[in-house]
Image: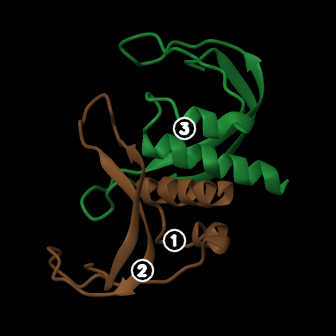
Chain colours: A green, B brown
Amino acid sequence: EEVGYGARKLQHLTSLTIAPGYQSHCTHIVLAQDLYEQRCEGDEPEEIEVVPWSLNRLNELLTQEECTEARSIAALFMVREHLARQ
Amino acid sequence: EEVGYGARKLQHLTSLTIAPGYQSHCTHIVLAQDLYEQRCEGDEPEEIEVVPWSLNRLNELLTQEECTEARSIAALFMVREHLARQ
């Protein structure tokens, strides 16, 4: 809700690690669907910029210089696979 | 060559980050093709276990409890996309 939407459907897809031999850190990937507008205060030091982007254009997104974060990329591919299976 | 193969074809696909706001760490993803057997001494404290796995079975790999590392998962999806485009 920090990005301005609530979701009627939340689904845990997977949990990702980034250096499992060194860090116990784990990122849970949750697919939010059936959204509605609702904003709650977040805990980020600055406002989050929301850039809508269609999953159909995922490959184009990956050519952007700004889009390099491995967990986000893995999550987007996994969401696309998940939705394609439905 | 730590895993027992050399490659006649190496191709830089992308560079991934894991927490770009905090770390300058960057992982280069290189696709190695046209392999031949050759082993060089690596710098890992233990021997690397090589588990051959077909990209066609990527979704099955992702259901394995051991396979959670975000850069590896992102890289495998990106390689699959890259090869599909050829």
Name the image quarter holding the N terminus of chain B.
Answer: bottom left
Position in image of residue A64 (x %, y %): 50, 29
Which chain's residue wears label 1? B
Q: Secondary structure at mark 1?
A: loop
Pointer 2 residue: B35
Q: Residue at x 62, y 54 (%)?
A: B81
Q: Position of residue A86 (x, y in %)?
A: 85, 53
Specify the subunit that label 3 lies on: A
Q: Residue furthest front?
A: B8
Residue B59, x across and y down, in percent: 66, 66
Q: Mark 2 Cα within 10 Å, few/some/many (few <14, many 20+)?
A: some
In the rendered image, residues at marks 1 and 2 fall on the same chain: yes
The residue beneath circle 1 is B65
Mark 3 lies on residue: A62
Q: Amino acid at mark 2?
A: Leu
For badge 3, the amino acid type reads Leu
Q: Counting other residues with Cα less than 10 Å from the Cα at mark 1, is it few (<14), some (14-19), or many (20 or more)?
A: few
Residue in the foreground of this view, choosing between A18 and B7: B7
Side of B3 relative to B62 (left or right):
left
Callout in the foreground (1, 2): 2
Q: In the image, what residue type sits under mark 1?
A: Glu
**Mark 3 vs mark 1: same chain?**
no
